[in-house]
Image: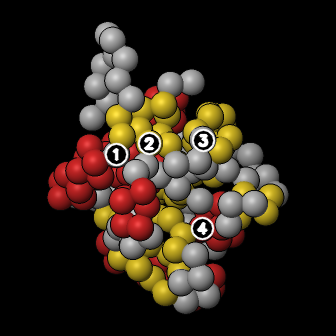
Amino acid sequence: MTIAYIITPELRQKFKEPFGTLIEGSFNQTMDKMKEFVSKEKPSRIISVGDVVSRNLHEHNILPQLTVIDNKFLRNQTMPEQATTENTIKVNNPQGTITEESINAIKYALEKNEHVRIVVDGEEDLLVLIAVLYAPENAFVVYGQPHEGIVVVRVTTEKKTEAKKFLKAMKVFEKLNRKKTV
């Protein structure tokens, strides 16, 4: 496992702010609003990052093409396994990091024309940045905002640039002869 990025203490606070549009409310309220949003905006793909938001999307028949989970809720409570998918990939991604393995899994999943579930041993939160970076234009990357609702990131050139800036501000692990990730 090669760690590509590590969050800095300065960025940790910044990552608590929504990276997209915050939809506030209960699970049912946010899913009703999400259905309306999807119907109106017709995203090219939906990508979910996080256990609770992914489970709620599936339960409300909003089916992401890519689901990234760690089988945990608020860092320590185990979530039950979700329904099986056509393709499940397991990756290691320690808390506060982004690994090469996770980056490659997301890239691979986004190239597929099937539902892919990535199960993370560690933490999936920062993988929102990788999903935004490699998702097609007009895709939605959806993640949970604890105790508030969900965040929908519409993938645009501007959001991809913003994701790159966050990644460049993180500590980067370089190895000789390793291709730069971003």
Say whether residue 161 is left or right of residue 60. Answer: left
Which amino acid type is marked by label 4? Answer: Val
**Residue tagged 1:** 170
Query: Do we see residue 40 in this rendering?
Result: yes
- The answer to whether the residues at label 1 and label 2 have Cβ atoms under 8 Å apart is yes
Nearest-to-viewer mark from 2 and 4: 2
First in sequence: mark 2 vs mark 4: 2
Query: Where in the figure is residue 177, as x and y percent of width and height?
Result: 32, 10
CA separation, marks 2 and 3?
A: 10 Å
Q: Which of the two discs, 4 and 3, labels the residue nearer the N terminus?
A: 4
Q: CA distance from mark 2 to mark 4?
A: 24 Å
Looking at the picture, how far across and down is residue 52, in whole percent?
A: 66, 67
Would you place residue 175 above or below residue 129 in this image? above
Q: Considering only vertical position in the picture, is 73 above or below 21?
A: above
Rounded to the nearest whole Å, what is the CA distance between mark 1 and mark 4?
A: 26 Å
Relative to the observer, which residue lies in front, 116 or 14?
A: 14
Q: Give amino acid for label 1.
A: Met
Q: Which residue is at 39% across, 29% downward? A: 173
Q: Which tag, 1 or 4, sits closer to the chain's start?
A: 4
The mark found on residue 94 in the picture is 3
